Image (spheres, rainbow, N blue to C red):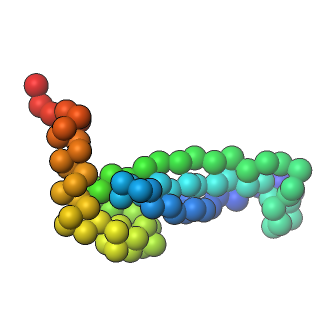
Amino acid sequence: MLEELHVPNDQIEVLGDGKIQVREATYIARDGAIDPEFPPRYRRYVLEPGSDVHDKDARIASVAQAVWTPEVVAAHRARSDERGVGAKE
């Protein structure tokens, strides 16, 4: 029997600017084992430094806590301000 196997944090990657990219994977399993005949489907999302991660997996929160120092968050906000990202009109 075929079933979907969802892996919510298949890969957690820290990008050079302090953003955290998370990849989720969905595999097709046959009788409990991943079936190599079906390629995995991936979904990615990015968390910006200083984002609220209280509702994320503990591994993601731990990475954010380690990487998002006050200096990293301040640098990210300064870059965003320079580009006008999040500016109110």
Residue drawn at x 89%, y 50% as measured from the top left: 37
The quarter of the picture where residue 33 lies is: bottom right
Residue 85 or residue 2, whichever sits in front: 85
Measured from the top left, where is residue 64 in percent x and y? Answer: 35, 67
Measured from the top left, where is residue 58 in percent x and y? Answer: 42, 73
Q: Residue furthest left?
A: 89
Whether residue 63 is visible: yes
Residue 82 or residue 58, whichever sits in front: 82
Residue drawn at x 40%, y 70% as measured from the top left: 63
In the displayed structure, would residue 82 be above or below residue 5? above
How many numbered callouts? 0
Residue drawn at x 18%, y 47% as measured from the top left: 78
Q: Quick check: 14 left or right of 82?
A: right
Please state, as top left, top right, bottom left or bottom right, where the C terminus lies in the image. top left
Residue 14 or residue 51, whichever sits in front: 14
Residue drawn at x 53%, y 48% as measured from the top left: 44
